[in-house]
Image (cartoon, rainbow, N blue to C red):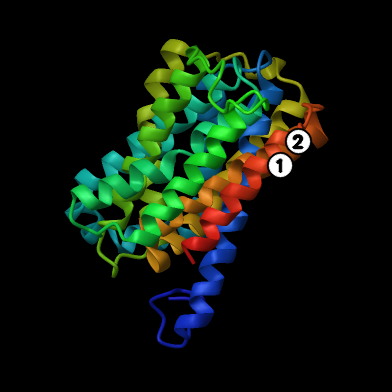
Amino acid sequence: MCPSDPRSPSASPRHAVWLARAALCLTTLLWSGNVVAGRALHGVIDPVTLNALRWIVALAVFLPFAGRGLWVQRAALWQVRGALAVLALTGVVLFHVCVYSAVGQVPVANATLMIATTPFFILAGTAVLGQSRLTLRDGAALVLSLLGVAVLLGDGEGTPLAGVHLAAGDLWMLAAVLAWAVYTLVLKGLPATLPRDAVLGATMLLGVVMMLPLWLVFGSTGLAALPPAVWAGVAYVAIGASLIAYSLWSFGVDRLGPGAAGFYLNLMPVFGAGLAFLLLGEPLVPVQLLGAAAILGAIALRR
């Protein structure tokens, strides 16, 4: 157990809370970069192949450092094998294949906006499962967050939802959002005594096993023809957006709970739009700044 672990007795509650908040902010930045990378690599590598390579590389990097811990925890992991299978299916396979499929059809801003709706599904799930109760503050944060998303989806002419049409890319993103909500809820339900690096390793291992048949059927095996820029993108999504980001997300969910952690996904439209502007040249418009302000206000309410 590391000193920054929220379950560690040496970590003060206030210190752990601020670490969790910082971890969740960094997670959303890394995942926003993942969406930008998927958009940049569209047309060069298909979504299934990109996701398969991502997790194969991530697992190859992970095992030399944490493989022994995974083996030590094998009995405890076997006890929650059903939950781990759901985590692998939703968090490794479905979420990313759907996101990479979507960003080939919609701009980064649109994709990250759909991700910003995830907290609604997570909070609804926690309420249905009896894990939490919605407070007045929760409701206010949800409304403010929804207003921010509505503004960002709008046309900037005072009619926030005018002209919004759910295209194929939007449907891919909706599927991704539902998958991630399930992933977060199941993750929170795991025993607190189970090391999260072991959970991550088992999830990646199962996810790779699930991805391999999909890769063979729907993906491409012509890896030798991939340019160096693609491999650089794979390295980023495998290490930054997978190993680092998933570990930080688990830390944040453990400390703050799935409902509060979910609200930090509302930062993705802010980070995503900024990165897309800087790296891909996707334009920024004033209405996005207004929506971002509402989203940041919603997060502040959930503090």
Residue 244 placement: quadrant: bottom right
Look at label 1 and name its amino acid.
Answer: Leu
Look at the image and tell me whether residue 123 can be seen: yes
Look at label 2 and name its amino acid.
Answer: Pro
Mark 1 lies on a secondary structure that is helix
Mark 2 lies on a secondary structure that is helix
State the CA–CA distance, disc 1 to disc 2: 5 Å
Up/down of 137 relative to 159, above or below: below
Up/down of 238 relative to 263, above or below: above
Instruction: Tell me the residue that label 1 is attached to.
Output: 289
Residue drawn at (47%, 52%) of the image: 263
Q: Nearer the viewer, residue 167 or 28?
A: 167
Q: Position of residue 243 (x, y in %)?
A: 54, 50
Look at the image and tell me whether residue 244 can be seen: no
Q: Nearer the viewer, residue 117 or 17?
A: 117
Disc on res. 286: 2
Residue drawn at (52%, 27%) of the image: 99
Residue 85 placement: quadrant: top left
Q: Position of residue 265 (x, y in %)?
A: 52, 47
Residue drawn at (26%, 46%) of the image: 125
